[in-house]
Amino acid sequence: MNELKRLVKTTGVYFLGTVGTKLISFLLLPLYTAFLLPSQYGQYDVNITYATLISSVCFLDIWTGIMKYMFENKENEQQFNVVYCGIAIFSASAVLYMLLMLAFGFLWEIEYLPGVAAYGFFLCLQNLYGYLARAYGKNLLFIFTGLVSTACNAALNILLLAVWGWDYKALYISFSVGIMMQCAILEMDLRLISHFRKKYLDRDTMKCLLRFSLPLCVNSLCYWLLTGYNRIIIEKEIDSSVNGYYAVACKFGGILLLVSSCFSMAWQELAYRKYGKDKDTGRFYSYATELYIKVLFCGFFVMMPLIYLIFPYLVDDGYEAAKQMIPVNMLATLAGILFIFLANIISTYKKNNIVFLSTLAASIVNMTILHLLIKQIGAEAANIALLAGYVVSDGIRICIIRKEIDYHLNWNMFCYLLPFTAVILLGFWKGQKEDNMVLIAVSIIASLWILWSDIEPLILKGLPKERVQRSKD
């Protein structure tokens, strides 16, 4: 119970720290869809997909390795070794990234190449400083800088798009400046630059970090083939406008990602501290996975009818085609969130090479189904392929975890989760406004019923002892 309370508390902290940055792109949808054509927004989405691919491969997810080894090494001197060896690897990766972006940009004639390159670099710089702030326990600072970044991003977007009439170049600039502000404030507190000493560059530590992170590099490539690849195929096989609709549909899946990313950061810290193989650890991970699955489905149940109602107010009429893509994309997002959750458990046992194999299997399934269906059903093929890929990988990862610890899930929960999912989908695709208003109320009641056995102990624990005793009696 103490671990669950810590997890809930830490999730709340990260929600406050990241909610603005993650939510801003969703809340600004009315602005984006009003001032950018679907073809422009689709082109922007494809460009940042390229930047994400190259940056994720070059930077090796080194921030994950830094956090992992900082938690394992408690002495200040050892932690300094981990931090500065990680930063050295990050710096070398930055040089490689800029060279590759330069070559790629000229080869493919990417529009606004400096902005695209800046987007990928600052995304990784934010990860580096964010992970370090979390590792050092700077939670309040993390919250504050996230809010500053959000405010700066939003203000610049409104100024550049609505006032000065810029095109999608404004999105790169707003994002980059917002992240620069966040990292500058974190640097003033962490003082990574001024604390640097050459003696902290330890060869053995650097080798450990590279051994841990190199499989994550290949895994990132496969992960891109599982997500970003679909956007490029839509653009090549159909056009940028359809990719614009797909990008807007993905923004609604991003709401689930918003909350889950906060939980994932809190979960990652807890998981990295629990790497035993005893039965208690197995039961903990089994219960946590079951609870996570139920919470994800309940979030889906409530959000789908709500999205049906608010869609016309958030998205310009020119993007109406995006609405029908949302349900399957949301299901794919749900499976993808579980995909990340399971990866954190596996990484705890330093099995990153196996994480790669499961991601590779998912990307192969995704690409195969995408190419088979794209000409027949259009952009919806990307959602179906993504969902299938994630489901396959989730199954593989569950099997991997079972080989490491005593890990058993209660599959009976799907006997009620899946039928209710079908009802929600039917209401979204075939129902009217009134039907979805009813479904919101029904979904809230159903979610409370599904989660009550998990919520009740937390409620009772917060009550005075005499009331807890009466409730038990």
Image (cartoon, grey):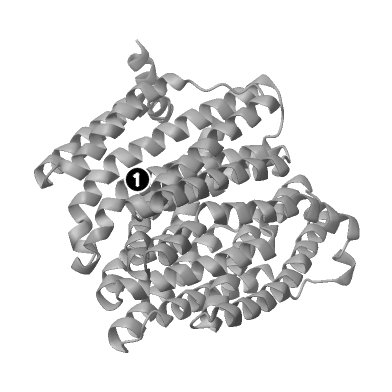
Please identify the residue farthest to the top as the structure is shown: 473
Instruction: Give the answer, above or below, for where 306 lies relative to 88.
Output: above
Q: Residue 1 at x, y = what percent?
A: 53, 29
Q: Quadrant of residue 25?
A: bottom left
Rate crowding at label 1 as few (under 14), some (14 to 19) or many (20 or more) other CA atoms within 10 Å: many
Q: Residue 45 at x, y = what percent?
A: 43, 68
Q: How many marks?
A: 1
Observer-nearest residue: 273 or 9? 273
Q: Is residue 192 left or right of residue 268?
A: right
Please identify the residue farthest to the bottom as the structure is shown: 164
Q: Residue 373 at x, y = what percent?
A: 40, 48
Q: Is residue 470 left or right of residue 282?
A: left
Q: Which residue is mark 1?
A: 328
Please identify the residue farthest to the left as the structure is shown: 434
Task: Tell me if residue 137 can be seen.
Answer: no
Observer-nearest residue: 380 or 149? 380
Q: Residue 47 at x, y = what percent?
A: 49, 72
At a point 40% along the width and 36% down the height, the residue shown is 295
Task: Tell me if residue 430 can be seen.
Answer: yes
Q: What quarter of the picture does the C terminus occupy?
A: top left
Q: Is residue 121 left or right of residue 259?
A: right
Label 1, secondary structure: give it: helix
At a point 43% along the width and 82% down the height, the residue shown is 169
Q: Quadrant of residue 299?
A: top left
Q: Label 1 is placed on what type of residue?
A: Val
At a point 53% along the width and 43% down the height, the residue shown is 365
Q: Quadrant of residue 468?
A: top left
